[in-house]
Image: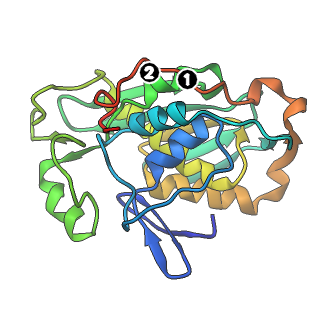
Amino acid sequence: MENVARVSYATSLMKKGVLISTTEHLLSALAATGVDNVYVELDNLEVPIVDGSALPFVWIIAKAGLKQQRARRVFIKIIEPVEVQDGAKRIAIYPSDAYHLTYRISFPHPLIGEQELEFFPCLGGYASEIAPARTFGFFEEIETLRKSGLIRGGSLENAVVLTRDGVMNPEGLRFPDEFCRHKILDAIGDLSLMGHPMIGHVVAERGGHALHYALVAKVSKERRAWRLVRASETERAIPSALPSPQLSPSAAGISE
């Protein structure tokens, strides 16, 4: 958490003067598949956007496989509500027996409107229900993003680009509520910055990277709102086994 540098259009991390942008999709895939000890090597200042989703990273993790370590996983179990509000934007986490997220979004666009989705990472389904959801943006935002040093290789192959009344991508959407699913994808990645997987119910309304990080920061400060527990104390909270999606490298947007 202490390495977070920027949380505007993407989550950027910095350490010893080195800034890495767009980390949230990779963080999401790692968190959802239960990976909490890994080295990631990059040769650029931005994590590859690939197809704009977390699916390519899930495929890479599945191909590499996981190794179970001896140490038991430690969780942050929420015992008192923690809330953050910024105007109409709001995010909170409440006590619960398992980690799950309820996300609500609202955009004045005919393809989005109001969407709501609840997702339980511990029950599986991330690879098929959340990971394929791509990042999205509006056509008029593209130049702003590029000036910010983001989406350097941005194209219709790695993002859903919305016009005033439709979508520019010829293949259309992967889900009718792909936008809300991608918000959950981002939240899983951003909230992993707590340093431990959490046990609680996250409820977000019109959120984004900045609001996700604000919750992380507030939870870390409100020490009485949570306690550390071992995996054996709450089996339902243990992340499900790595999904095994039937993917080819080309379907995941990568090459071998």
Q: Do the residues labelled 1 and 2 touch (CB within 8 Å)?
A: yes
Is 211 or 26 nearer to us in this picture? 26
Is residue 90 at all visible to an observer of this figure? no
Where's residue 242, x and y in %? 60, 27
Q: What element carries label 1?
A: loop
Where's residue 198, x and y in %? 71, 42
Q: Which residue is drawn at 15% across and 40% down?
A: 162
Q: Is mark 2 on a helix, strand or loop?
A: helix
Where's residue 47, x and y in %? 39, 56
Is 242 or 254 nearer to us in this picture? 254
Q: Residue at x 74, y 30 (%)?
A: 238
Instruction: Give neighbour class at mark 2: few <14, some 14-19, many 20+ (Cα, 10 Å).
Output: some
In the rendered structure, which amino acid carries the disc numbered 2? Answer: Ser
Q: Mark 2 points at which residue?
A: 128
Is residue 177 at all visible to an observer of this figure? yes
Looking at the image, tell me whether mark 1 or mark 2 is earlier in sequence order: 2
Mark number for residue 45? none
Q: Name the residue under label 1.
A: 243
User: In the rendered image of this protein, does residue 88 appear above or below residue 178?
Assistant: below
User: In the rendered image of this protein, does residue 183 appear above or below residue 9?
Assistant: above
Q: Real-space Cα distance between discs 1 and 2?
A: 9 Å
Is 224 or 64 nearer to us in this picture? 64
Q: Residue at x 89, y 30 (%)?
A: 232
Looking at the image, which residue sits at the far bottom? 17
Instruction: Classify the position of the N terminus by image quarter.
Output: bottom right
